[in-house]
Image (spheres, rainbow, N blue to C red):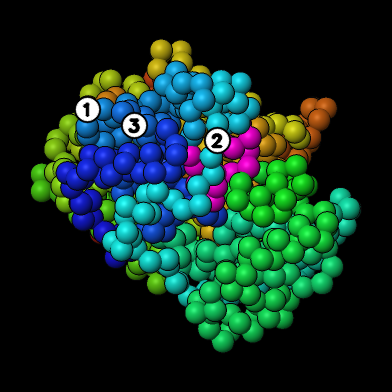
Amino acid sequence: MFQSFEAPAEQSDAMDRIVRLRRLLHELHIDAVLIPRADEHQGEYVPACAERLSWLTGFTGSAGLAVVTARELALFVDGRYTVQARKQVRGGDVEILQIPAAKPTDWLQQKLKPGTVLGFDPRLHTVSEVDRLAATLSPAQIKLKPLTRNPVDRIWGSDRPPPPQGLVHVHPLRFAGTSAESKIAALQKELAASSQDAVVLTLPESIAWLFNIRGSDVAHNPVPLAFAIVPVRGKAEIFIARSKLDGEAKAHLSSFAKISPPAAFGDKLAALKSSGKAVRLDPNTASWWVARQLGGARRIKRGTDPCIPAKARKNTTEIKGARAAHLRDGGAVTRFLAWFDREAPGGDLDEITAAKKLEEFRAETQALKDISFDTISGAGPNGAIVHYRVTEATNRTLKPGDLYLVDSGAQYLDGTTDITRTVAVGKPSAEMRERFTLVLKGHIAIARARFPKGTRGIELDPLARRPLWEKGLDFDHGTGHGVGSYLSVHEGPQSISKRGMAELEPGMIVSNEPGYYKEGAYGIRLENLLVVTEAEKIPGGERPMMGFETLTLAPFDRRLIDVSLLTLDERAWLDAYHARVREAIGPQIAAQDRAWFEAATAPLE
């Protein structure tokens, strides 16, 4: 199994940890300290040694920020995690606030007096984050103080896990589609055009993509933790522990890059500073510490990490691989759904058993390298926790009348998958069917969308919400996120969300996952992955339009669809989608599941 269901250690000593942290404030000459959920690389997913926020507070979500003062503690989370945070973080003096409605800077200005000092670990905050903090807090006479050592690490001590040492492997050209040498050459051409001498890369997924390597330092994310510097001419340089490299990886990297130990990274940054060279750094992904080593925020040449947009635009090989991965994965998920429908009515099936069985079906493909995230396997009220992670302590047996939400994904050499289905156990209520259908209508609206060049995700996001809005309903997460190619299941810059400012371009893969959550009762989410298609002329139209090709292949639960709420066009889309699923997945379905499969993919009546 690639996932564990052990319950997190009881945080009975969480308040003791916070008390110990507060004792350090006086010693460090600060009045408050920021504890983000981040590591030195600023990736969304972090290794165990960087789970400082979880260790301190008990909150295990993938995004959050705690502010600790001498008397108060505030935890800021987004809409995906408000329910989870309330369940995980206990203590009378913990205030849980939802961003973006609640802003950490507003809270700090309310709680801190003029002349007070706010401490932060400069390696765990981006240049942009510190810039925003300074711009807001300086007028209030609140000073920022970078700390030389993280205070949580000091009280964590020898119990803190060691840094990961996962082996690096070469990502074959037959899956990457473009050689590392070609990618580096294109990057260097971009630097030359911008009159820049070098770029510093800090995101592990950017380095993995650029150098055609993959790793295992972060759970479910095939990336190595490393830094890199690419000069406008000559060899690139990667800063990575040699213990992670076998002979093949060393030979691969040595052909186009210099291999240096991580400890040499700071010295190389200092040398770049002394040379006076123009060095690009992405202020949204690189830490304030890196910028300081280069001479400070004013000395760097601000610009987007050049790997981010290039990586997002999948080449023809990667798109072909994504189709193959989703065909394989769709068969595994569909076989699981058939098994689930047989087992769930018996009353003995629980969330953990279901999650394990789904992983077994994927493992039977003989191509599974890992899951792409811990499976969200939520029955009844647990399904209303957007990023619920089942444990032995929370495991729930499915009951007649429950909705079951399963959000899962896989890592294959040819692609990364992410799919969510919501299914009924027994007879669903009229309300469940109505709200499922509203979510489905939003899903279909995104899948059918046509849009001109320059369209951003923020402009498509309302299409998914409109059916819910018309009934006074909504959901507190984005409609879609970018997905990598055997990389992170969450990839930028593309998204379909209220903050989706990046233009959608051909080759980008993005999820389509509207939802609805009734706290304490049930959750609904329907997710497919899409790839943005090239612009084409529409007969009779005046401008070429892009659209989406749906990659994910698995049936939706027809029992939860109120057909009377669908338009003729929506019904036609769903019937065509199920016909495609039937044709593509059919050869993978065994005889015992054939009748179920034919019914699950039949046209609507």
Secondary element at image label 2: strand
Coordinates of residue 301 in the picture (x, y in percent): 78, 47
Q: Nearer the viewer, mark 1 or mark 2?
A: 2
Q: Amino acid at mark 2?
A: Leu
Secondary element at image label 3: loop
| Residue 272, visible in the rendered structure | yes
Mark 1 surroundings within 10 Å by alpha-carbon count, few (fewer than 14), some (14 through 19), many (20 or more) = few
Observer-nearest of 368 and 228 = 228
Observer-nearest of 67 and 428 = 67
Q: Earlier in the sequence, mark 3 or mark 1?
A: 3
Task: Say which mark, if any, is on residue 109.
Answer: none
Q: Earlier in the sequence, mark 2 or mark 3?
A: 3
Q: Residue at x 75, y 33 (%)?
A: 454
Q: Earlier in the sequence, mark 1 or mark 2?
A: 1
Coordinates of residue 566 in the picture (x, y in percent): 45, 23
Task: Say which mark, if any, is on residue 92.
Answer: 1
Q: Which residue is mark 2?
A: 144
Give, as a single range, the part of the protein colored magenta. Answer: 119-132
Residue 4 position by quadrant: bottom left
Task: Say which mark, if any, is on residue 70.
Answer: 3
Measure the alpha-carbon separation of dots 2 and 3: 16 Å
Q: Nearer the viewer, mark 3 or mark 1?
A: 3
Q: Do the numbered discs 2 and 3 sit on residues whose CB atoms are within 8 Å? A: no
